[in-house]
Amino acid sequence: MIEIRHLSKWYGPTQVLDDCSTHVAKGEVVVVCGPSGSGKSTLIKCVNGLEGFQQGELVVDGVSLGDAKTDLTRLRARVGMVFQHFELFPHMSVLKNLMLAQIKVLGRNPDEAATRGLALLERVGLKAHAEKFPAQLSGGQQQRVAIARALAMDPVCLLFDEPTSALDPEMIGEVLDVMVELAAEGMTMMCVTHEMGFARKVAKRVVFMDHGHIVEEAPAMQFFEAPQSERAQAFLSKILHH
Amino acid sequence: MNYNWNWGIFLDQVKGGDETYLDWLATGLGWTVAVSLTAWLMALLLGIAIGTLRTLPSRPLATFGAAWVELFRNLPLLVQMFLWFFVVPELLPKDWGLWVKRDMPAKEFITAAVCLGLFTSSRVAEQVRSGIQSLPRGQMHAALAMGFTLPQAYRHVLLPQALRRVIPPLTSEFMNVFKNSSVAFAIGVMELTFQARQMQEDSEQGIETYVAVTILYFLCAIIANRGMAVIEARSRIPGLIGGSH
Ligand SMILES: Nc1ncnc2c1ncn2[C@@H]1O[C@H](COP(=O)(O)OP(=O)(O)OP(=O)(O)O)[C@@H](O)[C@H]1O
Ligand SMILES: [Mg+2]
């Protein structure tokens, strides 16, 4: 589903991704972790073309992103993304947030979009809040809405960039529950997260990044039980202490 | 002071005509409002477009927007008024220039409204630009990530938020339009300031004249201010204090 081959990216003179290769097969969950500034967000934003890259190859669902002829808009409509700071549209109701792209991008009619939107809100346990505005919800609720909004587009895969790191600890669980459920249903997911419990439970593999490199990639159990690189060991000992 | 107060002057007939001075002021107010509202409408449409251009990734478009703003913001309004009235028609192709000078209907009004509209558009554009730039970058990312085109992202996500944020500074721009419209008298638009000068000379009751004109300008500003306040209240986003983050 997602093939990343020898990807390199520079911001001006500074290299932020250095020869990164990995893949996510259909129905797989891959967790990306690593210290701050290691390039995790940059990598995941390359996957739906929010960031460009200079070298390498990136193919998502058969579409090559390096190709100048690729219709990025079309691809993005099929790849869902969930952000650290939710990024719900604050000027429209929760339901409108779920309907807008269905109508404007997929061309669904408003009734259809509303039905689909309400069904997804029900699924994340927020149907009662459909007419509220994002700022009237808690962080955990907003992130669940954001997940529902991504699902409303019937994506072929979902990208998560630290979906729980802006949340108060007591709200992390409700968001992870939704993500675990999605994984169980076979959703293809690439998740930047430091939630190691989540990674253990659902991740097929863990990708560990540092300074723009993919330093280590291993099946989740192996990564946690016996990390190979020193940097991964140091990183794990730090986050597992918290 | 030997001033002959006459507050009844407004109902007197003007010299050599059958209108009253009140009629003159009413006509003036009418032109002031017409010039101001036309200019404001233009300024809003152009200002939103130019302000948007300035935030685009495209270099040429952003440069065009910047040039527009600097051009119209940095010349005195009165000079711009004269340029549009006296100089621009000379620069047009000969036939057009002649038509503008001789046959264009409501020539003074159109020139004044266009000039004030362009001048104000540069100021609106700056507000709109800063409004867009004040939004979290993630909003644009979220919009694009859902498959919106860049124009759709602006139309549905960025501009509705940015415009709400800049209602307070736009309110003062709207009030400024009414004040700045007085410059139109210099090219012969029979707006409030023009009528005031005429009434003062004709009636020799300068104080009453300018007290009345002051009140009328003041009313325009208040109504503009209240109108924008209503829009601000109506567009307020539930859950956000003061309508922004
Ligand atoms: N627009 C940009 N221009 C220049 N450098 C950038 C830009 N965005 C990110 N960087 C740099 O690229 C590197 C990788 O950033 P990135 O955001 O991908 O890291 P990250 O692993 O997601 O970190 P975090 O855990 O803090 O989110 C950092 O050194 C950052 O300073
Ligand atoms: Mg990041």
Image: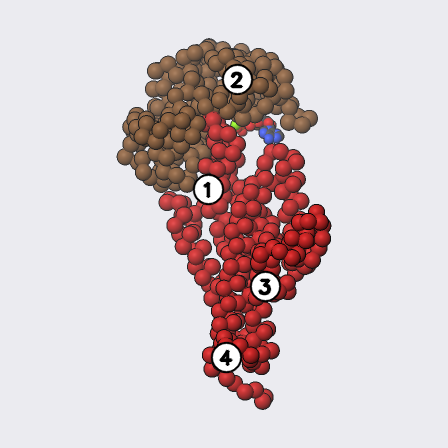
Chain colours: A brown, B red
CA separation in Å, label 1 and label 2: 40 Å
Q: Which of marks 1 and 3 is nearer the N terminus?
A: 1
Q: Nearer the viewer, mark 1 or mark 4?
A: 4
What kind of residue is marked 2?
Phe
Q: Where is residue B119 in the image (x, y as percent from the top left)?
A: 61, 53
Residue A208, disc: 2
Q: Where is residue A148 in the image (x, y as percent from the top left)?
A: 37, 27
What kind of residue is marked 1?
Pro
Q: Residue at x 55, y 15 (%)?
A: A64
Asked if the residue at label 3 sits under 8 Å from ligand 1, the reply is no
Look at the numbered disc 4 and give the secondary structure of its residue.
loop
Asked if the residue at label 2 sits under 8 Å from ligand 1, the reply is no
What kind of residue is marked 4?
Gln
Quadrant the N terminus of chain B occupies: bottom right
Q: Are marks 3 and 4 in contact (CB under 8 Å)?
A: no
Marks 3 & 4 on one chain: yes
Residue B160, disc: 1
Q: Residue at x 71, y 55 (%)?
A: B87
Q: Are marks 1 and 3 in contact (CB under 8 Å)?
A: no
Quadrant the C terminus of chain B occupies: top left
CA separation in Å, label 1 and label 4: 51 Å
Q: Where is residue A195 in the image (x, y as percent from the top left)?
A: 43, 23
- Say which residue label 3 marks: B189
Question: Residue A51: which quarter of the image?
Answer: top right
Can residue A150 be seen at all in this image of the molecule?
A: no
CA separation in Å, label 3 and label 4: 22 Å
CA separation in Å, label 1 and label 3: 36 Å
What kind of residue is marked 3?
Val
